[in-house]
Image: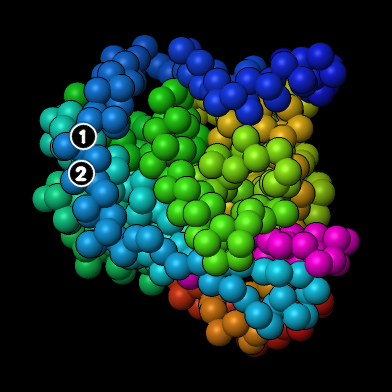
Amino acid sequence: MSDDKPDAATRERLLAQALAGAFPDAHGRYGPFGGRYVPETLVPAHERLEQGVARWLGDVEFQREYQQELKSWVGRPTALSHAPRLSQRWGADIWLKREDLAHTGAHKINNALGQALLARRLGAKRIVAETGAGQHGVASAAACARLGLPCTVYMGAVDMERQAPNVGRMRLLGATVVSVSSGDQTLRAAIDEAMRDWVADPEGTYYLLGSAVGAHPYPYLVRELQSIIGREARAQIQAQAGGLPDLVIACVGGGSNAIGLFHPFVADRNVAILGIEAGGRGAGLGDNAAPLSFGRPGVLHGSYSMLMQDADGQIQETHSVSAGLDYPGVGPEHALLQACGRVSYEVAGDAEALAAVRECCECEGILPAIESAHALAGARRWAQAQPGKRMLIGLSGRGDKDMLTLTQMLLAKPPAGVL
């Protein structure tokens, strides 16, 4: 696929397939995106995982154990909260899907628990994982502690500094946390190191990937495990509000919370869907983490998707105030949904996200993660443009982990535009 958008006929074909639930295909493709681009040493591991997903994900006993743990340990279903003061302020009907209330504080536990249960059935002796904001690392450490599996988490040195509380939590949960000082020292570098570890022992080690990225079958597996968010929210909003929302919106980094919320709504043509990427400091290369808005297609971490890269195809460093969105790629299903026109993607900058944190705190008594606040910022703009609509916002996690950043950037000296 070139940098050009697909022609009208291709766009309609992809849209029809997306609405029919045709993706991924047998090769792990989402239209032109996805696939499996991995070293030869990891091909057997991916094939073994693919076979395991096919065997176990729909298994009655697997699902019984998984659903029981989600209920009794994770705390599902998470609440759908009406936001009366934000609704009044924005002139819209605002509902928040509260993944911040899940065990460990974010949506990441849905995927970590499911993959850890799968890894045990595949005979894995140890787990490796990567983390950016630390929430996936905490979730992986907690799931492994629950199941008695050794866990090693790779985390960029920059992220370890700005997410220190989560580093401590991972260690208390029994995980070994490895600081990654190579590359950009953020999520991309952590994924690189976790994959190197996996290459060294692809049979005894299971790589518990945290987002809807990477080589097939990871984007599919993560989507399936996270779709519980959208299934719950779809049923809850119909029961509580009397109908479907006009808009579903979530923040997008790698894209796991977003695809989990979006997927059950994709076939609802009357429901608009909007993803919000990290706009950082601006549109320049290196100033943001928004590959769907400013990137070009290419291969990263085993998958063909939209990436932040220069004219020579070199992956570039990204910037975001939120560690969890600070990644130069995005899941291939998001790239497809944008290409076929089913989902729109916009950006929210650092200042907008910080303003949204304060507004949500003061209006609703909820401290959102800075990642989630990007969705709130995008929702606020959408409400101003289309007043009176019902909006479902994915609140992917809580902001306790961000207090160091919030203290430095919001409480000490509010940046321009912060309320």
Q: On the rendered image, what quadrant is the N terminus found in?
A: top right
Number of other residues with Cα within 10 Å of mark 2, as a class: few under 14, some 14 to 19, many 20 or more: few
Looking at the picture, does residue 325 appear above or below residue 314? below
Number of other residues with Cα within 10 Å of mark 1, as a class: few under 14, some 14 to 19, many 20 or more: few
* Residue located farthest toward the right when viewing the structure as drawn: 385
* Residue in the picture at 72% in, 83% down: 414
Q: Secondary structure at mark 1?
A: helix
Residue 202 placement (x, y as % from top left): 24, 25
Q: Residue 311 versus residue 343: which sits nearer the camera?
A: 343
- CA–CA distance in space, label 2 to label 1: 6 Å
Q: Residue 349 versus residue 171: which sits nearer the camera?
A: 349
Q: Is residue 375 left or right of residue 344?
A: left
Mark 1 highlights which residue? 60
* Residue in the picture at 88% in, 61% down: 385
Mark 2 highlights which residue? 64
Q: Is residue 59 magenta?
A: no
Looking at the picture, does residue 5 appear above or below residue 126? above
What amino acid type should be assigned to the residue bearing mark 2? Arg
Q: Residue 64 versus residue 243: which sits nearer the camera?
A: 243
Q: Is residue 341 left or right of residue 245?
A: right
* Residue in the picture at 35% in, 54% down: 109
Q: Which residues are magenta?
A: 373-398
Q: Indicate how the structure is coloured in the image.
A: rainbow
What amino acid type should be assigned to the residue bearing mark 1? Val
- Please tell me in which quadrant of the rendered image residue 146 appears: bottom left
